[in-house]
Each structure stands twice: as structure tokens, then as C-alpha cells.
Image (cartoon, rainbow, N blue to C red):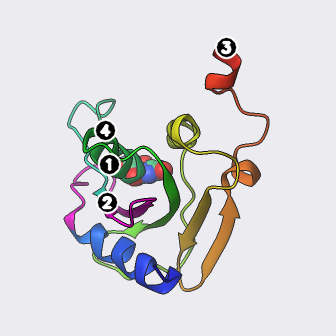
Amino acid sequence: MKDEMLSTLAREARELSYCPYSSMAVGAALLGKSGKVYLGANIENASFTPTVCAERVAFFKAISEGEREFVKIAISGGPKGEPVRKSFAPCGVCRQVMREFCSGDFEIMLVGETIEKYTLEELFPASFSKENME
Ligand code: THU
């Protein structure tokens, strides 16, 4: 799948964000090795801490449907109802979840007016992972 297509899907996924508290609408489009794309949007909660980020929603949908290997993810976030201008980076918890299922070469695309590309190793170096549990 082309980067532009995955980026468009991430932008569109923002529209399903439930973010009445922060008004930050985030969308993610995750490409599995099977070729299937899993979309996610952030889901907030009045109690705040149960809030789940768009990236984790996409990962948990994929994992719970049996996908275990991943190619890349596109992430787009910004004020609800406005087109995204700046890049929006994944939080530390989402990086840790990515690391459980992805190696360092997993691609992370931050979709704003332009697309910034990183690897998981670049955004999450010297990470703790299942290799540390062996
Ligand atoms: N958020 C995400 O969806 N992904 C991230 O990686 C960082 C933060 C959401 C959580 C919350 O609903 C809003 O953005 C503001 O933090």
C-alpha cells in the first residue's frame, strides 16, 4: 500500500474520534503483513485515565483479529474539526505497545501537511521488550 493512501486513511479515521475532553482528534491506519489495514481513533472518558489512543485502538483491533506482524502505521492528530497541519507523535505507552509486536524497522508516518517518516527504533531506542523477558 502506498504511503499516501495509508495517510489518507489516518486522516479520515480522525472523524470517528471520541474526544469531548481534549478536542484533539487522532486517527491511525495500521498496515498488517497480510495487507489488511486496521483503523483507530482515540476514545476518551469522563474519568480521563481510561482514555485510549488511536494507535492502540488500531493495534488492539488487529491483534484481536489474529494479525501479528505489521509493516507500518500512519498517525494524524490535531484539533477536532480542523485539517491537520503539524505532525502528531505517538505517546510513550503506544510506542511500548508497538514494540511488543514490531521490530525496530517498523515504519511510523506522522501525517500533517507533510509526511514525516521514522522507524520504531528511531522513536523508541534502547527499548524494553519481550527479548528482555527471555
Ligand atoms: N492521543 C492519541 O490518540 N495518540 C497519542 O499517541 C497521543 C495522544 C490522544 C489521547 C487523548 O484523547 C488526546 O490525544 C489528547 O492527549
Q: Nearer the viewer, residue 125 or 16?
A: 125
Residue 18 horizontal side relative to residue 33, left or right: left
Looking at the rendered structure, the kind of residue marked 1 is Ala
Q: Quadrant of residue 119?
A: bottom right
Among numbered discs 1 and 2, the one appearing first in the sequence: 2
Label 4 beta carbon within 8 A of ligand 1: yes
Relative to 129, is 97 on the left or the right?
left
Residue 82, image x, y percentages: 34, 80
Q: CA distance from mark 4 to mark 1?
A: 19 Å
Tell me the amino acid under the disc marked 3.
Answer: Glu
Residue 28 located within the stretch drawn in magenta:
yes
Q: Amino acid at mark 2?
A: Tyr
Type of amino acid at the residue the image marks with label 4: Thr
From the image, tell me which residue sits under label 3.
134
* Image x and y of residue 77, in percent: 43, 66
Q: Which residue is mark 2?
A: 38
55 or 105: nearer the eye? 105
- In this rendering, the label closer to the viewer, 4 or 1: 1
- At label 4, counting other C-alpha atoms closer than 10 Å, the crowd grade (few under 14, some 14-19, many 20 or more) is some
Residue highlighted by disc 4: 51
